Image (cartoon, rainbow, N blue to C red):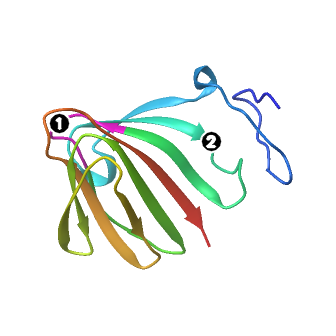
């Protein structure tokens, strides 16, 4: 199945392939009150895959951050690919790097900061329910 950016598809027994050139890219400033700019490459559009609210590659340049925020009725997963950072998980700072995964469940809060000298690259997945 080939999907254009204008289509919304609910996945029910469907295999879908989305090529990189069809993925929407956004540069957002001060995400959740954080510092700097974060580049979002949306791997799947919101609503295209059932309960998935966000599935994106995030790229934070050195010093950039995503501010402290809470998740209610959803969970957020970070899968770290490149670089290093600090996740504040409900008030506790944790160093993260390639291969690490963090999970922020419903009712919990977190923030993220690139404390390294290269871009911090991760996949972010938010699932409702």
Q: Is residue 62 magenta?
A: yes
- Secondary structure beneath dot 1 equals loop
Magenta-colored stretch includes residue 128: no
Secondary element at tag 2: strand
The percent coordinates of residue 17 (x first, y second) are 72, 33
Q: Quadrant of the C terminus?
A: bottom right
The image quadrant that residue 12 belongs to is bottom right
* Distance in Å between CA atoms under marks 2 and 1: 26 Å
Quadrant containing the N terminus in the rendered view: top right
Question: Can you give x and y, in whole percent of width and height, for residue 78 in the image?
Answer: 41, 55
Estimate how packed mark 2 is, as few (under 14), some (14 to 19) or many (20 or more) residues with alpha carbons within 10 Å: many
State the image coordinates of residue 102 (x, y, percent, origin top left). 37, 63
Decide which of 78, 60 is in the foreground and name it: 78
Q: For the residue carrying disc 1, how many other residues have a C-alpha within 10 Å: few (<14), some (14-19), or many (20+)?
A: some
Task: Look at 45% across and 74% down and name the residue there.
Answer: 105
Residue behind mark 1: 62
* Residue at 21% across, 50% down: 85
Across and down, in percent, residue 86 comes to: 19, 56
Asked if residue 121 is positioned above or below residue 10 in the image, the reply reads above
Horizontally, residue 126 falls left or right of residue 98, namely: right
Give 104 or 100, whichever is nearer the viewer: 100
Residue 31's tag is none
Judge whether 42 appears above or below 24 on screen. Answer: below
Q: Quadrant of residue 119?
A: top left
Earlier-in-chain disc, 2 versus 1: 2
The residues colored magenta run: 59-65
Name the residue that disc number 2 marks. 44
């Amino acid at each position: 199945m080939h999907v254009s950016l204008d289509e919304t598809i609910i996945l029910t027994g469907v295999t879908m392939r989305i090529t990189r050139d069809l993925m929407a890219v956004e540069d957002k400033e001060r995400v959740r009150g954080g510092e700097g700019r974060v580049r979002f490459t949306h791997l799947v559009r919101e609503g295209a895959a059932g309960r998935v609210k966000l599935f994106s590659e995030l790229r934070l340049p050195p010093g950039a951050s995503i501010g402290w925020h809470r998740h209610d009725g959803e969970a957020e997963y970070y899968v770290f690919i490149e670089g290093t950072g600090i996740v504040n998980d409900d008030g506790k700072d944790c160093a993260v790097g390639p291969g690490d995964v963090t999970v922020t469940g419903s009712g919990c809060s977190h923030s993220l900061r690139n404390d390294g000298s290269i871009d911090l690259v991760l996949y972010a997945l938010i699932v409702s329910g």
